[in-house]
Amino acid sequence: MSESRPYRPIRHGLDRRAALWPAKAGRDSVPAPAPRVAVVGGGIAGLAAATGLSERGVRVDLLEREEVLGGRAAGWRTTLADGSTTTMSRGFHAFFRQYYNLRGLLRRVDPGLGVLRPLADYPLQRSTGARDSFRKVPRTPPWSVLGFVARSPSFGWAGLSGMNPRAALPLLDVRVPDVYEQLDKVSAADFLDRIRFPEQARDLAFEVFSRSFFADPRQLSAAELVLMFHIYFLGSSEGLLFDVPCEAYPQALWNPLAGHLSALGATINTGTTVLSVAPHADGFRVTRSATVSPDALEEDHYDAVVLALDSAGLQALVGGSPNLGGGSWRAGIERLRQAPPFLVSRYWLDRPVHPDRPGFLGTSGFGPVDNVSVLNLWEGDAARWAKATGGSVVELHAYAVDATADRAGIEDTMLRELARIYPECADATVVDARHEWQQDCPLFSVGSYHDRPTVLTGHPRLVLAGDLVRTAVPVALMERAATTGMQAANALLATWGVRGHPLWSVPPAGRNRFMRSLARLS
């Protein structure tokens, strides 16, 4: 068992002001006999926690309810009507360059991130014909703001001059948790009203930032919207362009990472539902069942537990574990809410889209459609199918769908709107289609911040991870999942005197002294 040695974290990315969150020092690995940890949930947060623990010698059992890993970035094989097999998924995800910790997780099996490829632009198309682009916008604030204003047909100098400068100044110096104390009780829509954000450019804030949380801006906390502005636009010089996996999620990301975990001695159990977690003086008793035999219950003893579940899954597990956590903690878990349903519609078409179509397009004013991806331009499975058939693979997303809406009607509308967005698809024959409805994203509703749990639970060997978990690190979405997963691992490692894993983020405050000084005027 070796003692800690000097370790110099490597900063990946372009932003020289990216913030290092150092890990606690300690031994390089856990003492023998190695403790045993159950990581409940095989999404990004669970995979990050399992990786952080396994790399320090902890014996990890990863327990995932579904048959596949990846959570909301999972994928699975499916057979199309033409007899070909391909991978269907939960839909497009953007791997932004600010996602330092997620990308760090992926570097475990792909140090150069060769599996990710950049998309040339992040365009936003309105039904009026106007289009915004982030392709030629400078990366570094405040030049990014000025460059965008100069190029935007919907925002422009008139829009900037019409804003309420004093009300908008907090955008220049965003800090966690201060931003939640200031704005959590205000909706994203009301905040944009308050700063007089140009009406014709609202979809920029809503489509690019707010609806990324799968939520109606009238329900979303303004603090989350402002944090998003900071992460992607005003606080970072990584820019708003992003990368995408060049193969389907399982092949590109999760299967290699599962192989890495197995090589470290971790056990991966998919198709496994954890029903309860019961604390004991020397650890936890975990009761689980397998999908193939749900009535056959198994009990195992663990020294520690990581709960890396979505809010509904966490509520179900806590509800089935009456001795887990204190009363206020359990009440906060019970008050967690899910965002409205969302739809991913993927079409395999008998003809190509026009060659100048972007790989990804945000949309506004086209019914329920929030974005369109031409998958065969960047994803291997789709590209091979398109090459073999002469067709194309197009995916549409609809976020924050009314829970009472006619789902079949929404699906029909999606296809009709595709013909408006890309008219060459109007006469295309749909070789096959998949419609994936889900409702498992956390809703960060107005005033809900203090109900959201933290990584720590009050029990030193029980920790949480996931994008629903609040953290002092300025992160969101997939990056929040990866970050809290590593924080959960670090918290447990500290209890055994083992060094954790350093983390990175965008600057945790206004980017420079001038911006911070302006923000204080508010």
Image: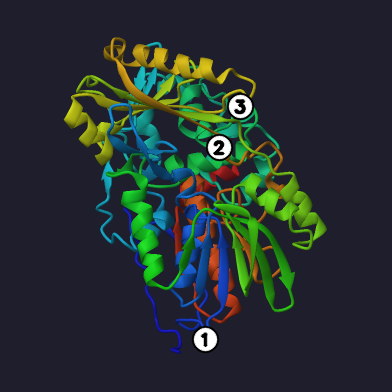
Instruction: State the residue position of label 1.
Output: 31
Instruction: State the residue position of label 3.
Output: 189
* Sequence-wise first label, 3 or 2: 3
Q: Amino acid at mark 2?
A: Leu
Name the spot of residue 272 as percent of width and height, x first: 56, 56
Q: Is residue 374 above or below residue 413?
A: below
Residue 104 visible to the viewer: no
Instruction: State the residue position of label 2.
Output: 225
Q: What kind of element bears circle 1?
A: loop
Name the spot of residue 190 as percent of width and height, x first: 64, 27
Q: Is residue 212 above or below residue 417?
A: below
Tell me the number on the disc at residue 202.
none
Q: Choose between 308 and 114: the one closer to the eye.
A: 308
Q: Amino acid at mark 3?
A: Ala
Foreground mark, 1 or 2, reads 1
The residue drawn where x is 23% and y is 32% is 385
How far separated are the C-alphas under marks 1 and 2?
A: 44 Å
Label 3 crowding class (10 Å Cα cut-off): few <14, some 14-19, many 20+? many
The residue drawn where x is 69% and y is 44% is 336
The residue drawn where x is 36% and y is 66% is 260
* Sequence-wise first label, 3 or 1: 1
Callout 1 touching callout 2 (CB < 8 Å): no
Residue 512 visible to the viewer: yes
Name the spot of residue 355 as percent of width and height, x first: 19, 23
